[in-house]
Structure formats: structure tokens, C-alpha cells
Image (tube, rainbow, N blue to C red):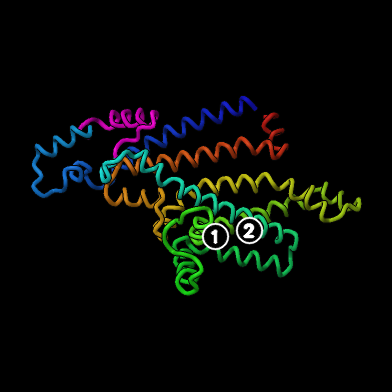
Amino acid sequence: MPVRIVRRLAGFLATLFAASFVIFAAVYAAPGDPAVFLAGGRDKLTPERLAAVRAQYHLDEPLVVQYGRWLWGCLHLDLGRSFKYSDQVADLVATRLPTTLALVAYATLLFVVLGVGAGILAAVKQSSWVDSAVVGGTTLAASVPSFVAAIALVSLFGVRLGWFPVTGSGSGFTGTLHHLTLPALSLALGALALISRVTRQAMADAAASDHVEAARASGIPERDIIRRHVLRNALGPIITMCGLVMAGMLVGTVVVETAFGMSGIGSLLVGAINTHDFPVAQAVLLLMVTGYIVVTTVVDLVHPLLDPRVREEARTA
């Protein structure tokens, strides 16, 4: 296990380093010159003014030198200063990050509880109308994009019925929960469908194993068989997929936060791209990639602990 941890940490650092360079280079390869924006537009822009702005923000240096300067600052939690707001990028991200984390946590709770529950119900009631209803409902949920689901939820529960607010993130625990219900539900719909399918298939594969048939033949109650033998053996792929889906939700918040007018890092990223605020865009993208890599690395390390068969295969290899 220590060797596995060291290897995964080395892969984590290498992946993060490569991703950071791609993020930095891709943002500067986008259309538009940040120096022109920093100079206040093209009106009355002189070559001397443009050269001064480039020198002030080190935009006249080679790309590798700029990347090294930016990476060194990131290692010291200095993400630069926003072109648009003239504030420290770290302060902007820290202000908006709690809203996004609360949204992701709420959506994760929804798709884990509802998705795993629906998958277990469909696996237990296979070849019945319950199974068909779960499969049909999850297929419909998976086919609806998050922005379409957001618009439909706002129209029905926010405008017509007036049960939930459609903008903002609320204050206090109850207010935040009330404001985040519709955004979290729209964010969790596709994940709920995926998790229910994975749960159903994993439990079906576990139920077809020989030791489950032997347990049934020995007279063990069906409820105990499902809980001790089927569900326990299916936890590995279920938890792995839940972790991967949760990691990818940071990117999904971009659409949902924009649709519901929330002040999170997703809407901050959209505004930074529209205004060519490159330091903010780079910081938010780096944060999203880091979060995804961290969660996937943790899931990869935890998986062998959940499934002894994986640990034995790794030891044999």
C-alpha cells in the first residue's frame, strides 16, 4: 500500500504539472490581446502605451518565463491580481468558493441517495414494472442537459408554483438549503441516472456469483443476502463512480450557476472569460482541475480497501 500511495502521488503531481501548463498556454492562446484590455481599449491606444502595459504585467516575456513566474506564485498561493476587479485573485476565489462547494455537496447528496436507492430498487425488483420505471426514468433524466433541466425547474417550481427562489444562494443553513435545492437538483439529474444504472448493473453482477447462489441454497433470508453479499460486493464500482461524478461536478457548476444567477466560481469563470480576465480564468480552471485530480486519486487509493479482489490482483501483479 505505501508503494501504491507513492506512485499515485507521483502521478498526481505529474498530471497537475502538465494540466497547469495546458491551462496557462490555452488561456493565452484565446482570441484577444489582454494588453489591449488592460490599456483601456483600442481608443487612443498608442504603441508606447501598449508597450508600457506589456512590460508592467510581464506580457512581453516568453511564454515559458511567464508560466514559470505564474507557477511559482501559485505554489505560494499568489494567484495574481484580477484585470477587471483589481483585487487579489485568491480573495475573489475564496469569497465565491463556499457557494460552489455547498452546491456540489448538496447535489452529491441527492444523486448518491436517490441514484443508489433507485439502482438497488431496480436490482431487487428486476424484470418487473418497478425495474422498467427506474430504467425509463433514468434514461429520460440522462438525456436532458443540465441547462434545459435548470430552465424547466425554474419555470415550474420557481415561477409557476413559487416554491423555491430562482436566484441567489441564500443565507443561513435553512436559507441556503432552500435556495440551492433547484440548482442542486438540476446539477444532480444526469449523475443520478448514471449512478442508478451503475448500481443496478453492479448488483446484478454480484447477485449472479456462485457464493450468492450457495447462500440462497443454504436458506439465508433474501434481505440478508442482498445486504451482506450482493450490496457489499457491489460497493467498489458504486463508490468509485460516485467519486468520479462528484469530481466532475465542479465543471458542471458553470452552467447551473449562470442559469440561477449564483455567485460561485462557475459564474466567476464565465465572467472572466468574457472580459479577458486571464488571471481569474487561470486560477479557477486550475482549481477545478486540481479538485478533479485530487478526488480521482483518493478514489483510486480507496478502491482496493473496499474490494479485496482488487487488492489481491494488485499484489499478485
**Residue 222 visible, this angle:** yes
Dot 1 corresponds to which residue?
189
> Compared to 144, does 25 lie above or below?
above
Image disc number at residue 61: none
**Residue 197 visible, this angle:** no
> Compared to 57, does 161 lie above or below?
below
Number of numbered discs present?
2
Q: In the displayed image of the protein, which residue is found farthest to the front? A: 172
Tell me: 103 left or right of 84: right
Which quarter of the figure has residue 21?
Answer: top left
User: Label 2 amino acid?
Assistant: Leu
> Could you give the CA–CA distance between mark 1 and mark 2, rounded to whole angstroms?
10 Å
Residue 46, position in %: x, y? 8, 42
Which quarter of the figure has residue 107?
Answer: bottom right
User: Label 1 amino acid?
Assistant: Leu
> Compared to 45, does 182 lie above or below?
below
Name the residue located 91 percent from the left edge and 53 percent from the top edge. Answer: 219
Tell me: 13 left or right of 42: right
| Magenta part of the chain | 59-81
Q: Secondary structure at mark 1?
A: helix
Residue 7, position in %: x, y? 56, 28
Dot 2 corresponds to which residue?
114
Name the residue located 72 percent from the left edge and 37 percent from the top edge. Answer: 309
Name the residue located 67 percent from the left edge and 32 percent from the top edge. Answer: 314
Q: Crowding at label 2, few (<14), some or many (≥20) Cα neighbours within 10 Å? A: some
Which quarter of the figure has residue 204?
Answer: bottom right
Q: Crowding at label 1, few (<14), some or many (≥20) Cα neighbours within 10 Å? A: many
